[in-house]
Amino acid sequence: DMTPIQSFIQRVTYKFQGVARESNVLLSSEVEQEAAMIEMDPDRIEQVLTNLIDNAIRYTPENGTVKVTQEEFEDGVLISVTDSGTGIQDEDLPFVFERFYKADKARTRGKSGTGLGLAIAKNIIEAHHGRISVKSKVGQGTTFSFYLPRIQSTK
Ligand code: ATP
Ligand code: MG
């Protein structure tokens, strides 16, 4: 499927406005003006973005922010979820995409998950010939980004 990526991002972000409000976290999206089409499985990419936003809200204390952004490149699009949350320790960073890995459970808001979300996300992004990565600073926040090539068949 060719999916209009801006409206896709805005729709998935909108889904979380209720949860964000309940958690006192300010959730926003910032997408580029020009319409961009991406060849992707929208249900699977929604699962990825859903997990990243869900994590970001869960690991961000009250009055924090979560921002979903889109950056266009010639060959594809980079989608990032940035939070002002707890951050991830350097020693945990290499493992967050591994199955069942959970860093510092004590800081989780509410009940914590199974530790599968990011492993599934990585699988889905790699099946789209994309890349997923993380940058984080303890006490400052975390950014998860994934790159999706515009067209699958040329890869
Ligand atoms: P699931 O997604 O399966 O319900 P989960 O959210 O615990 O469970 P993942 O999404 O795979 O699992 O995340 C793995 C671990 O990475 C989390 O348990 C948490 O320790 C850490 N993590 C993920 N996202 C963030 C974030 N935005 N800020 C801080 N830590 C994070
Ligand atoms: Mg998760």
Image (cartoon, rainbow, N blue to C red):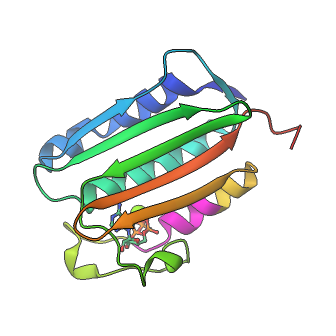
49 w.r.t. 153: above or below: below
Q: How many marks?
A: 0
In the rendered view, tell whether residue 141 sits above or below residue 4.
below
Quarter of the image for the N terminus: give it: top right
Residue extending furthest right? 154
Residue 5 higher or lower than 113, as above or below: above
Residue 108 in the magenta stretch? The answer is: no
Residue 141 image position (x, y, % from top left) = 29, 60
Please state if 95 lies on the left or on the right of 151 as rendered.
Answer: left
Q: Residue at x 52, y 78 (%)?
A: 94
Can the viewer see residue 144 in this picture? yes
Q: Residue at x 21, y 38 (%)?
A: 18
Specify whether residue 121 is painted magenta: yes
Is 89 placed left or right of 117 in the picture?
left
User: In this view of the protein, which residue sits in the foreground, 86 or 14?
Assistant: 86
User: Which quadrant of the figure has residue 62?
Assistant: bottom left
Residue 38, percent from left and from top = 68, 30
Quarter of image, ligand 2: bottom left
Q: Report whether 65 appears left or right of 115.
A: left
Residue 55 appears in the figure: no
Residue 106 in the image, given as x and y percentages of width and height: 21, 81
Q: Name the residue: 43% across, 36% down.
A: 69
User: Looking at the magenta stretch, what is its main secondary structure?
Assistant: helix
Residues shaded magenta: 114-122
- As displayed, is residue 132 above or below residue 16? below
Quarter that holds the C terminus: top right
Is 89 situated left or right of 31 in this image? left
